[in-house]
Amino acid sequence: MKKAAIVALLATTCTARSLNQNQLVSAFKRNNFAAKKTICNLRGGAALDYRYFVAGGTCAAISHGITTPIDVVKTRIQSEPEVYNKGMIAAAASIVKTDGPGALLGGLGPTILGYGIEGAMKFGVYEISKPLMASLLSLISTADNKAVAYLLASVVAGSIAAILLCPMESARIRIVTDSSYKDSNTVTTLARLVQEEGVLNLFGGIWAMLAKQVPYTMAKQVSFDIFASMLYGVILANFAELSKEDIKWGVSVGAAFIASIFACISSQPGDMVLTATYKEKSDKGFIGILQDIYGKAGVAGFFTGTGARLVHVCSIITTQLVIYDVVKQSLGLPATGSH
């Protein structure tokens, strides 16, 4: 039974066109190296396709980089709500007046580098995990588990991305919220944080990062897939004269915008906790920070800065997912939801 399960999984996720299932079982029993090599030839499908990683890293670095000023304002509002309490525009004007226009680009370096790596892993791992999760679920049930497979793939991708992003997000938030880091770049900020607080402290916000990135990834990736497929279905069913090629960019933008709203709301509490974790050195821990935020403002405290973040996240995700589809298609992959 165990060998049959392994064969079923490999047969689904790898390219083994020349072998049927009986031959596969026989190959495993004989420990046939050539057959195993054929089974694990990962060409063709999503498995280990570098193009998803390239498209993901490109779209994340660009979209997060160009929205850095919005992110700076959002982070300041979250870290000092008593100072920046008159809305996003007033907060931006105050930052420029106090710290100069350059302050709005604070943390640009770690943002581009960190989210470039994070995006590559998030999109890449998500895409290669979807068929894997579908295969695993098919061993348990014959029902259509497509949505569940997508959700599980997004949890895996979001968790990996969160771990990789921690050091850069630690540097970004410190540059934006601590005036003593104002003139620091990515390298000097990381070096100083390691010297003063230790390497492990760069990952001190891992639980907060997971609380933000996993819901964010689930909402963004899965809703983009689902809504893109739905839009293709609805539009093509009602407008027979149109083809997928005619509507692919409109579908990408529409599905991306819807996904951005879901992603922002679902990850807002985690984002607030993350900012509180990294804005200054603290030994309170994840639970202590949750208690602090709740003690000061109740549940509403977790949604501080939501207005600025909606602008920020909707800008990022809509831009990001459209760029993702552009890069994917330029590399020979189909548009999301079109296949």
Image (tube, rainbow, N blue to C red):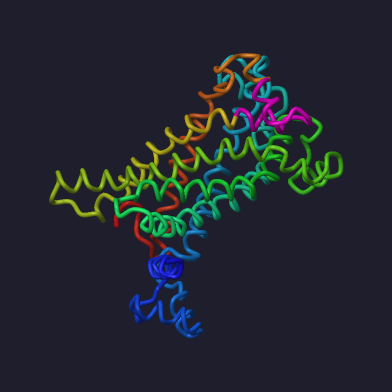
Q: How many labels were placed on the picture?
A: 0
Note whether 96 is above or below 50 in the view shown: above
Q: Where's residue 208, x and y in %?
A: 63, 35
- Residue drawn 78% across the image and 41% down it: 184
Q: Is residue 134 left or right of residue 180?
A: left
The answer to which quarter of the image holds residue 131 is bottom left
Q: Quadrant of residue 181?
A: top right
Q: Is residue 36 left or right of residue 184?
A: left
Residue 16 spot, x, y in % from top left: 38, 76
Does residue 103 lie above or below 243 as drawn?
above
| Quadrant in the picture for the N terminus | bottom left
Q: Could you say which is closer to the camera, residue 40 or residue 308?
A: 40
Residue located at (52% from left, 50% from top): 157
**Image quarter (top left, top right, bottom left or bottom right) of the C terminus:** bottom left
Please give the name of the residue rendered at 43% of the width and 55% of the height, measured from the top-left corner. 133
Residue 292 in magenta stretch: no
Q: Residue at x 60, y 45 (%)?
A: 162
Magenta range is 272-291
Foreground of the two, 334 or 8: 8
Q: Looking at the picture, how far across and down is residue 332, in whole percent? A: 39, 65
Q: Residue furthest right?
A: 195
Magenta segment main secondary structure: helix
Query: Is residue 145 left or right of 56 when viewed as pictured?
Result: left
